[in-house]
Every structure is written in structure tokens, then in C-alpha cells.
Amino acid sequence: MFAWFERRIDPFKPAPVAQPPGGLIAFYWHFVRQVWPVFAALLVTGGIVALLEVAMFRYVAKIIDLLKDTEPARFFAEHGWSLLGMAALVLLLRPLLGLVHDMIVRQTVVPSLTSMVRWQGHRYLVRQSLGFFQNDFAGRLATRVLQTGVSLRESVMELVGSVWFVVVYAVSAIILFAEADPWLAVPLVVWIALYVATLAVMVPRVRERARAASETRSALTGRIVDSYTNISTVKLFAHAEREDAYVRRAVERNTDAIRAQLRMVTVMSGIISALNCALIGATVGLAVWLWTLGAVSQGAIALTAGLAIRLYNMSGWVMWVVTGIFENMGVVQEGMETLARPHTVVDRPAAPALQVTRGEIAFDHVRFHYGRPSGVIDDLSLVVRPGERLGLVGRSGAGKSTLVNLLLRFHDLEGGRILIDGQDIAQVSQESLRGAIGVVTQDTSLLHRSVRDNIRYGRPEADEEMIRKAAARAHADLFIPDLVDLRGRTGLDAHVGERGVKLSGGQRQRVAIARVLLKDAPILVLDEATSALDSEVEAAIQEDLDALMEGKTVIAIAHRLSTIARMDRLVVLDRGRVVETGTHAELVAAGGIYAGLWQRQSGGFLGAEPSQAQAAD
């Protein structure tokens, strides 16, 4: 039975990745419409349960009147069937419907809807551009994905769960009070009007303050995660107290926001409590006075008193429910600002896959300024021939890494085109583009998974033998057998820590190289690929890099010129333009920017031919 209810919502049902709407109501409906039959069932069962509870109060009043008007000896004989019907309602129907309602809530909605919102939000968010993630805290983004799922579920469930109780109790109470005597309905109508007015004035203010509290909570999470992620920097500079102050400011802002929110809640609670006490006093007092006049029965007094007390208790519950709804709406609204943001780098409709046949790369009058009027890359044209090994050289800020990011389409161009084998990369799918390019960067980022999983990331279908060969070719097999993590996992099974912090820089780099070796893409980008390796390991791995580059189009970036001096051609960038091009020997002889950079670097270069070294001197 539990499993049947749990299967009513599939959190991972196949669906295209879609941008959630930007409007709050539309954002809610985007998710709720996917599971609307469940909420329809929740409304129906909730409505019936509310009606049954009101009917129970009416039965109590009826029993009191029957007791007053019937001789005890004849009571069961005259009213047995009526009492049996009441017992069936109280002992069978009400518990059964309550169980069904609770099963829908706890087994169907709570776990599955939350997971569905989180899953779809994550799928959309992870496809945002690189710049999107660079402009925000990873911790804050993760918090918004997780909290939005919970808050959306809670606010919808609270709304669905309370609407029938509010409507059924309010309308039924007015009808039942008016049946006994129209004057009895007057205090209730006045109370409802004042209650609704109080909520209308106070709840939106609570919502805004809840939204502010949610924003400060997300910022606090981001700061804490930022400190933990960069703990090595904190330790190296002995800035624990500075980080304390950085986080404390966020804690203080979050505390102030929560206090402001709770002040408003306390004021609203006080007003509602006063209204509730006035309702009970006015209703019961009026009923007793009408009874003394012979206008109502004793059962009517029991009915009005019971319903008034029930409304008193329920009104406090409804107040907290409504407050909770708007608090959660504030959290959802904050999450919506992140999850509903449009992708800045998107595929064209039905974009075809990139087909790499030769590996030619052409930068055609490329312009890119990160949205500024000028700078970075300005009208750059460059052709990398099929199978050519090209080295990019230039001072810091010359645009080398930006050019590689544009090739990978981490950003869209502001002008010009980039072509691979004649295909505009803006017209093909991003997945196929990046699948055709292997990249090893200086800032090697590993996943907090096993060494095996990190290497296999280059080719998910790779078997164990392929993984071990790739590790051996990258000389990672020299240290992998000695790895042990905190849970006792060893070798390829050992986990590397967040971003690979449990490995040295050189070890991370060799795992990254093994990953790209396994990927075996036709285009290869080496962005300071051996910068974290010592000279001995770099020399050992150079032959494997040469084998990796064989038959591929290669773009290599390095500040250490010795690592790219053996490329087929070197291109020097300055302020986003190509200013020099040629072989190492030609550029040294030309006496330009490259020659100046070379002269400032001492020593020879690894793996260079003797004639090249002599020419450099």
C-alpha cells in the first residue's frame, strides 16, 4: 500500500530541460501542473474530512437535544440506527479518509515533489554558462536549489490543506449558527471580516521580511562555504579571525532579518488572539442569552460553543499556515530569481552535432570584450591547420585563456565567427562541441569521487583496463597504489576530496592528463597543462603528450615557454590581437615580444632539440 502511494509521482520522469517561468504564480504552476491529479485528490479528501468534522459537531448538538427530549429507557430503541450511523462516521469513515489524506501527503507529495523540484532545478541550473557560476557562490546556488524544493512543496501543501478547512468551517458555522438563530451568525461574520482584514494587511509584510531573511540565509551559506572551500588560503595567511569577522557580518544580517520577521509575526499573533477571545465570548454569551429567552435549545449552545472553540483553535493554526505559506513563498521567490534565469549560452533549435573530419580551427574576425566597450579580444583572425600543434604565447591578460574559452563556447562571441572544419560552433550543439575537444588546464579541478571515476570521466564507457592504461601513460600509476582515504579505500577506489585537495598539484595534474588521454578527442587544448609538474615528471610525461598530440589539432598555452617551444607554430597575442607568428627559432631571431619573454626566462627548455637550444642562445 505504501509503495502504491509512493509511485504516484516520479521525480525523474523523462522530460526536456526547460526554463521555469519568471512569474511567481507561473513558477508554482510549472511544477504543480505536472502532478495536478495528486493535488486534486488531496483537495477532495481534505474537503470531505472537513465536512465530516463539522458534521460531528452537529451530531453532538443533536444528541444533547435527543437526550433532553427522550426517556432514557426508550433512548436506544428510538434512536439506535441514528446513533449507529454517527458511530460509523466517527469510528470508520473519518479515520479511513484521514489515513488516505495522510498517505497522499506523506508518501506521495512530501518526498517525491521535493525531489522533482530539486532535480529539475538542478538539471536546468547545471546547464547555465560558466560565467553564471563564476558570478555567484556555489554554496548559495546549492542552497537555493535545495530550499526551493522544500518551500514550494510546503506552501502548496499548506494552501491545499487549509483551504477546505477554512471554507468548510467558516461557511458551515455561519449556516449552522443561522439555523439555530440568525443573531448567532452576526459575531461570526464580524470575526471573519476582521480576521481576513488582519491577514490581508499583515501577511504580505511577513512575506517580504521572510524573503529578506531567506536572502541573508543564502548569503550566509555562501560565505561559510567560501571559507571552507578555500581553507588552505585561510590557513596560509593565518586569517581565521578575519574569516570570523567576514562570516559574523553575514550572521548579524541574518539575525536582524529574522528578528524583523518575527516582530511582525508576534504583532499579527496578538491581534488574532484578541479577535479569537472576542469571538468565543460574544458567541457563547449571545447563545446563553438567547436560550434564556427560549429562542435556542441547549444543543444550540453546545454547537455554538464547540464550533467557536474549534474556530479559536483553528484560527491560530490558519494564521501560522498562512504565515508559513507566505514565508515559503518568499523563499521560493528568491530561488526563482536563480532557477528561472534564462541561459545566456544556448543551442540553436535542433542544433546538429559537430562533425570533426580534419580538425581545422578558424577564428574569423573574433571580437569579445566581456560586455565592455573594448579590450580582451579585438578583431582576431587565426587559422589552426588540421593536425597542427599551435602554441599561444603572451603576457598575462593578452587573451590566451579567453580565446580557449571562446573556442569551447563558454561565452558567445560579440562579433565574428569560430569555425571547426567549416562549421560555425554557434550553430552546433554545445555537448558535441566540447565532446570533440580535450582540455587540460592549470587549475585542475577533480570531482570528490574515486580516482577511477575521475579518470573515467573522460570516457564513461571505459573498462578497467582502459582506465589503468591511461593512468600509466600519464605516470599516475606511480602514486595511485599508495593512496588511502579516510574510509580506508585505496588505489583507484580512493576518493580525492573536494576539488581533489587530498592530492598534490602534480598528482591532480596527472589524473587530469589521464582523463584527457582516455577521452582521446580530435582537438586538444593544453592550458598550462604541465605547470604543476616538476621537471623530472614533465620530462617523463612529455613523450606521452607527444603521443597524445599525434594526429590531433593542438592549441597549447604556457607561460613557461620551454614547454611549447617545440610546437609547429607559435602565435604571440598582445591586447587581444595576433602580433607575431612563427617557429620558436624564427621568433627569437625576430627580437620581438616573444624574444623578450624568452630572454627573461632562465635555462633551456625540456625536450627541445639541441639545435633549437643553440639558436635560442
Image (cartoon, rainbow, N blue to C red):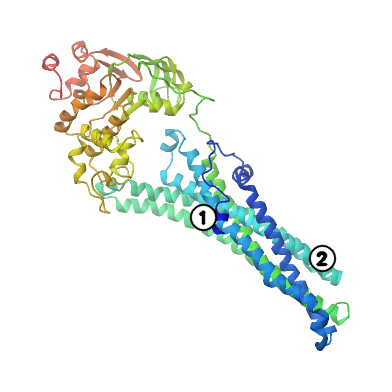
Mark number displayed over residue 104? none
Q: Secondary structure at mark 1?
A: helix
Is residue 261 visible in the rendered image? The answer is yes
Q: Residues within 10 Å of mark 2 (few under 14, many from 20)?
A: some
Mark number displayed over residue 175? 2
> In the rendered structure, which disc, 1 or 2, sits on the residue that comes first in sequence?
2
Q: Is residue 298 above or below residue 486?
A: below
Q: Residues within 10 Å of mark 1 (few under 14, many from 20)?
A: many
Please state the horizontal and vertical placement of residue 140, each as a whole percent of the image. 44, 46
Mark number displayed over residue 257? 1
Is 563 on the left-hand or right-hand side of 16? left
Taking the spot 23% from the left edge, 49% from the top edge, the residue there is: 484
Q: Is residue 460 above or below residue 520?
A: below
Please state the horizontal and vertical placement of residue 221, each as a whole percent of the image. 43, 50
| Nearer to the camera, 261 or 587 | 587
Taking the spot 32% from the left edge, 41% from the top edge, the residue there is: 453
Q: CA distance from mark 1 to mark 2?
A: 43 Å
Picture quarter containing residue 270? Answer: bottom right
Please state the horizontal and vertical placement of residue 576, each as a whole percent of the image. 36, 20
Is 365 on the left-hand or right-hand side of 44? left
| Nearer to the camera, 230 or 349 | 349
Placement of the C terminus among the 4 image quadrants: top left
Placement of the N terminus among the 4 image quadrants: bottom right
Q: Amino acid at mark 2?
A: Ile
Q: Secondary structure at mark 2?
A: helix
Is residue 211 visible in the rendered image? The answer is no
